Structures are given as structure tokens and as C-alpha cells.
Image: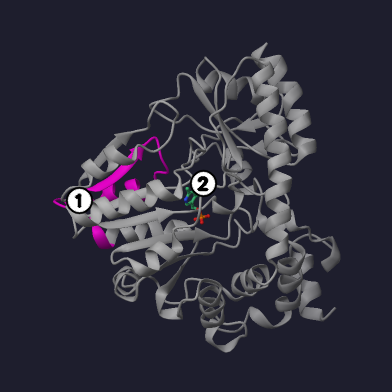
Amino acid sequence: MSLSRRAFFRNLGVDRADSVSPNLIASRGREALELWRNGLDYEDGFQNTRMTEGAIVISSNENPLGPGPAAYQALLDGLDQTAGRYPTNFRPSHRDLMQTIANKYGARPENITLGTGSGEILENGALAFTSPDKALVTADPSYLQAVGVAKRQGHAIRTVSLDANLRLDSEAIARAASGAGLVFLCNPNNPSSTVMSASDVEALVAEVRRSSPDTYILIDEAYHDYVTDPAHQTAIPLALRTPKVFVARTFSKAYGMAGLRLGYAIGQVETIATLAQWTHVFNSNNLANAAAVASLNDPQHVEQERARNKEARDFTVGVFADLGCEAADSQTNFLFVNIGRPAAEFRNACAEHNVAVGRDFPPMEKTHARVSIGTIGEMRRAAEVFKQVLA
Ligand SMILES: Cc1ncc(COP(=O)(O)O)c(C=O)c1O
């Protein structure tokens, strides 16, 4: 190990590169615990100071194992050379990453723009395509990052309730899209965990293109790699052949790189160019780029991660079912469970046992809680807490 690498790890408080775990790189739960310790508000409602190290943090839909072995190796290999170089002067460069993504989908790098997490794509989408007169259309509840930007900018927002099965209501969304600036379609949806089928997505896009041709459509597929329902397919080919449609993807979930902050948008060149006007230059870093290229070249790992998550997800669905609590049909790495009582009550009781579950999700916070899927070992231990708390 070189001197510089040794110094780097010493600063991290560890002696050897081998002892840096993927969890550290994925920064799993660290942000939450830090904010929690400081008593600060956190997106997932972490304000409870009773939690300690060793807590089971199943509140932020993170991958409990961090990056896969190929990505992890790329991070270690890159450490010596990357830090001092701009992304143009290090291989793989951000351009190499865009080419790797493009190759996967039969596209060109011009069809892609990177984001510091896919959250940046969502925010830029709201900035580029909504205004006080051009509304953002979103399901409710759904992921709020684009809504937050639209709100802060004073842009119009239209919300559409989920249907009785907590799925996105494609017909109601198509109706609400008339004259809108941007439709935000979170598929699978966070927090409800349900998926819209590929045929419904196609029908919705066709209807919006027909009835409101100036409206852009952003399909957020953050949890795509966790879907096991065969009715779902990625909308990337649809986006590549349809004007004004783009898909957001992230390396934060199945790829286990939430702490490295990398996502992308893919769509037609004109759409991506308009979106990219809001992007900061060099918004991805060398380590993230290298780990992402390695991940994309190791598709088997994502298959394994999907299977690992499904096993722990099925187990947890069964635990809640035995307690009389029904979970929506999860196609993600989290559950949205009808616990029949306020989420805050459940969350605070779980926190007493060092288990962190998700924040309130209005308008369903009086009945539903969101629980992320950790490792099977974590879910077995958390299950004992759920049994005590919900008994
Ligand atoms: C549906 C959805 N989209 C986007 C994001 C943003 O993730 P990131 O910025 O880490 O890519 C999240 C994060 O939880 C999410 O749940």
C-alpha cells in the first residue's frame, strides 16, 4: 500500500485498506445517525437521540451490503490516483461512464446526463420543465425531491391520489397532465413500493403525448433493479424513442453506492440537452465513476442483490402478515405496511429497541409505516421488535 493510501485510511480511523467495509463506503445510516445525534431534522424523521451505534437502520431504503465486489475493488484500485485528478484526466472518466451506460441501452453518450445522485436529475427536471404556469404533476404520496424544488420556486403543483391498491393511478395522472410542465412518475413508487406495469406506462405516455404534447414526463426508476413482477420493464427504450420523456436511474440502491452520490438521466438528445443546462460541470467524482463502470460490467451482482432482497422482503412481509398487518405489493427494497396506528407511535416504539424505521408519509401517516429491507439477519432481529411493538 502506498504512503498516501495508508494516510487516507488512517484519517478514516482504520489501519488497512482491507478493513474498509462496503458499508463504510455506502455510508449506510451514517448521515441519519449524525443528524440524529445533532438533534437536526432529517428527511426520514431521525430526531430520536435514544438510538446508538449498532442500531438496525431500516429507514432510508439503502442497500445493507454496500457496493458489490467489482465496484469495491474499483474503489480501492482508484484511491491512489483519483483524488488529485479532474474527471477528464482519469480513466474511467465521466465520459467513459456515459459511454458504458449508452452501450447497455443501444444509445449514445448524448442521450445521457449524470447527476450527483438521481436526486439532482429530479431537481433539474423541476427547474427545467415547470414554472408558476406549468405545473408539476405527481402522485401523493410519492417521492418529494422534485416537489420540494417546485415549491421553493413557487411553481404550480398538482397531486393525484394513489388507487385503492396504493398503485399510481394512470388515468387520473393522464387527466392531470393536461397543460402541465412535467409529469413525475415514480415507478416503483416511493413510499408505496408498488409498480405500474410496462403496458400502463406506455399507455399513459401515449395519452399524455396525444392530449398534452408540450408536457415532459420523468420516469424515476430508482428501484428498478429490485422489481420481481414480470409486468414491469424499464421505460428506457420508450424514452429513447419518444420526445420529452426521460428516465432517472441511481447507483444508490441496488448498486449500494448511496454515499458516493451518482445517478443519471437517459432520453432523446434534445430532452437531455435541455435538462443538462441545469447541471453542474463535473457533478460526478472519479471514485463514483470507476465504481459505476465496474458495477455495470458486473450484471450478475445485481441479480444476486435482487434475489437477496427478495428473500428478506418475503420474510418481512410474512412477519407483518402474521401480526395482521398487510403490506402493499412491494417491488422495492422497502415495505409500506398498514400497521393500523400512527407511524410515529410505531417508529418511537421501535427506536426504544434500537431499530430505526421510516418517517411519516402524509397523507397516510395515521395508518401506514415504511420499513426498509436490511439483511436477512437484521430483519430477523427487527421482526422480534415488531412483534413486541405491534402485539
Ligand atoms: C424514488 C427515489 N428517487 C430518487 C431518489 C434519490 O436518490 P439518490 O439521489 O441517492 O440517487 C430516492 C432516494 O431515496 C428515491 O427513493
**261 horizontally vs 27: left or right:** left
Q: At numbered mark 2, what does the secondary structure look like: helix, strand or loop?
A: loop
Q: CA distance from mark 2 to mark 1?
A: 28 Å
Q: Amino acid at mark 1?
A: Ala
**368 horizontally vs 350: left or right:** left
Camera-nearest residue between 87 and 137: 137
- Identity of the residue furthest to the top in this view: 391
Camera-nearest residue between 227 and 17: 227
Coloring scheme used: one colour
Between label 2 and label 1, give the one nearer the viewer.
2
Q: Amino acid at mark 2?
A: Ala
Res 4 → quadrant: bottom right
- The magenta region covers 128-153
Mark 1 surroundings: few (<14), some (14-19) or many (≥20) residues within 10 A:
many
Q: Where residue 16 sits: x, y (%)?
A: 86, 66
Placement of the C terminus among the 4 image quadrants: top right
Res 171 → quadrant: top left
Q: Residue at x 50, y 24 (%)?
A: 368
Res 326 → quadrant: top right
Q: Residue at x 52, y 15 (%)?
A: 341
Q: Which label number is shown at residue 131?
A: none
Pointer 2 with pointer 1, Cβ within 8 A: no
132 in the magenta segment: yes
Q: Which label number is shown at residue 231?
A: 2
**212 horizontally vs 260: left or right:** left
131 in the magenta segment: yes
Camera-nearest residue between 387 and 30: 387
Q: Which residue is mark 1?
A: 180
Along the polypeptide, which appears first: circle 2 or circle 1?
Answer: 1
Camera-nearest residue between 56 and 198: 198
Q: At numbered mark 1, what does the secondary structure look like: helix, strand or loop?
A: loop
Q: Is residue 15 visible?
A: no
